[in-house]
Amino acid sequence: MIRELLTQLDIPVDDNTQIAAARFRTRWQQLGGGDLAVRRVTAKDLADLQELIHSVNWQVADADINAILEHGELWVLTCNKKFISSAGWVEHGGDRAWMVLVTTHPQWRGCSAATLMMYKALKSCQNYSKRMLDASNMGENVYRRIGFKDCARVDFYEIEPSAPLPAPAQYNWQPMEKSHFPLPGSLPDDPAIKLLFERAPELCYVAKQDGRIAAWFIGREKTSHIHIGPIYAQQPDMAVDAVFFMRNLQPERKITLDVFAEETFLVENLKKLSAAFHHSHVRMYYASQPVPRAGENIRSSAGPDFG
Ligand SMILES: CC(C)(COP(=O)(O)OP(=O)(O)OC[C@H]1O[C@@H](n2cnc3c(N)ncnc32)[C@H](O)[C@@H]1OP(=O)(O)O)[C@@H](O)C(=O)NCCC(=O)NCCS
């Protein structure tokens, strides 16, 4: 069964993959066996995939999944046709792929299903020399064990609607337009920024200096709040100004943002905003090989978070 599974996965047969497959076999036997299959997810699988995503308490819009299918690949492991684990990737510009939707149904956790699916997803994007991801706490060990290295730390913050409004923005923020692409600092051919812009152009802005874009940010509509990021700013104070601007624009909404840990200027200045600006959680970025973070002057999240 181990050989068959590895053949189906079409991943190298070595000590690591064989141990992972053996761990998986034990659980599979405990759960009564069944027909295993590994296949690429298509648009027809949305309902089954959503069932798996709900089982891990995630919410991912169908539009986001379709974007992944269009700009990358998604793979799933099934047992008796039921989706039990998934992993995929999307283009992240140039020679970079970003790993996405790594999930395992709770019943199948801890038996290397995600590890095997990561090997599968990595194999299917082996033409990209840099493979990157941002990890939840649950995923960190999986990625480290496979060989991913810490690359950056991102802190998530929240600004409650009760926070007092900051001073008016100093820079002249203007709505982002299609003609502004490619945006400075964004990776060439990265589809994520464009997709996020198209989803909510009314939440995306640029600020110019000497006729050139010196700062921009993407706002994303989430279920209960607005998320700001990525923020690109040639000077740190422009990134602070971007958040002030959005806060003034959307005084009724909770706002979240994620900031690279070294962006202390941004954090210190936002803390001055009020006590209602607080830290919520941390995510680590990992890469298959040491790489600098996504772009120069990117102050906050650079990963193509479609969710
Ligand atoms: C994160 C998640 C995908 C992991 O799925 P999984 O199938 O349980 O993962 P694995 O079985 O491959 O690995 C689980 C653990 O076994 C360990 N493991 C894997 N292969 C192993 C091996 N051959 N030998 C010893 N340990 C091994 C991993 O290091 C990991 O260790 P941990 O318990 O210290 O974290 C799953 O918990 C999940 O769906 N969580 C919710 C969604 C999420 O957070 N996804 C990750 C987004 S970045």
Image: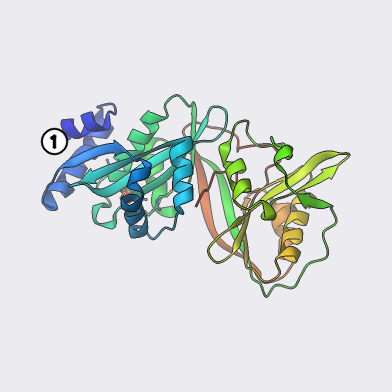
Is 49 left or right of 157, judged from the image as shown? left
229 relative position to 40: left or right? right
Can residue 148 be seen at all in this image of the molecule? no
Residue at image location 27% in from the left, 42% down from the top: 77
Looking at the image, which residue sits at the far front?
44
Number of marks in the rendered image:
1
Residue 152 in the image: above or below residue 291:
below
Quadrant the N terminus occupies:
top left
Q: Position of residue 118 (x, y in %)?
A: 36, 38
Ligand 1 lies under 8 Å from the Cβ of mark 1:
no
The structure residue drawn at horizontal position 43% and vertical position 39%, both measured from the top left corner, is 69
Name the residue rendered at 28%, 33% in the picture. Answer: 16
Nearer the observer, 100 or 270: 100
Q: Nearer the viewer, residue 65 or 231?
A: 65
What is the crowding at mark 1: few (fewer than 14 residues within 10 Å), some, or many (at least 20)? few
* Residue 191 in view: yes
Q: Identify which residue, 192 or 31, lies in the foreground.
A: 192
Residue with the mark numbered 1: 1
Report x, y in % for residue 81.
21, 46
Q: Look at the picture and state if 211 lies above or below 123.
A: below
| Rendering quarter of residue 185 | top right
Please, is residue 128 above or below residue 269 in the view? above
**Outermost residue toward the bottom?**
162
Q: Nearer the viewer, residue 45 or 22?
A: 45
Q: Position of residue 58 (x, y in %)?
A: 41, 58
State which quadrant residue 2 falls in.
Answer: top left
Q: Amino acid at mark 1?
A: Met
